[in-house]
Amino acid sequence: MRLVSRFSPCLLLLACLLLAACSPELDWRVIQNGEGGYAAMFPGKPGAEQRKVTMAGARFDMQMQAASAGGALFAVGAATLPQGATEGLRAQVLEAMKQGLLANFDDLRVSESRAQVQTAAAPQQQVDALQFTATGTARGDGQRRRVYARLMARNGHAYQVVVIEPLAAGESNAKIKEQAEQFLAGFQPH
């Protein structure tokens, strides 16, 4: 079964890079997204894009918000799942999001773990998330990049929370790593 369409969620994420290019650096702000069902702390004013994407053999509305800061891209993607989506469909969509991101890189090294994410809704609850860091060469421009990501599903949405960092001479920027951790921790689904 083909999980990723020609128009992958990562392409939507890269389109948002253009929208976010004028964002000021490190102007952290909380953005509430009622339609996407989340609150996120961005390092600048995010641009937004919405498209239909095909994942796990189905079409979904997916919206992206993204901001650039310190040379990195900070983005949240929210795919609206059909009412009554099964756990199996949620898992397939999250896997499609992951593969869509990773498909844009060669020479990948991926490190995965599980994370707990706090919800924004009261009372707060914990949501299980897949967290991974990947380093690879971008297929489009041949530049080495590191991707920090969390993927999760909650209340009718599947989310990808992503930071893409360019690597200069193969070295990670400790400041961007710290900002990526802050961005990932600042995301809260409703």
Image (cartoon, rainbow, N blue to C red):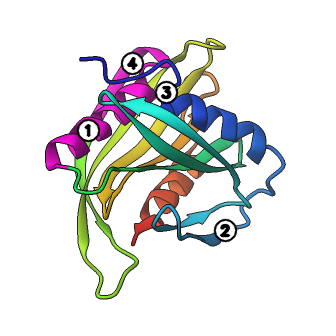
Q: Which residue is mark 1?
A: 112
Residue at 30% over, 30% down: 56
Q: Is residue 163 above or below residue 42?
A: above
Rendered location of residue 158, percent (x, y): 36, 50
Kind of residue at disc 2: Trp
Q: Which residue is mark 3?
A: 8
Earlier sequence position, callout 1 versus callout 2: 2
Mark 4 element type: strand
Residue 28: which disc? 2
Q: Is residue 70 above or below residue 84?
A: above
Rendered location of residue 70, percent (x, y): 71, 47
Q: Which residue is mark 4?
A: 108
Kind of residue at disc 1: Glu
For residue 116: magenta? no
Crowding near pointer 1: few (<14 within 10 Å), some, many (20+)?
few
Which region of the structure is painted magenta? 86-111
Classify the position of the C terminus by image quarter.
bottom left
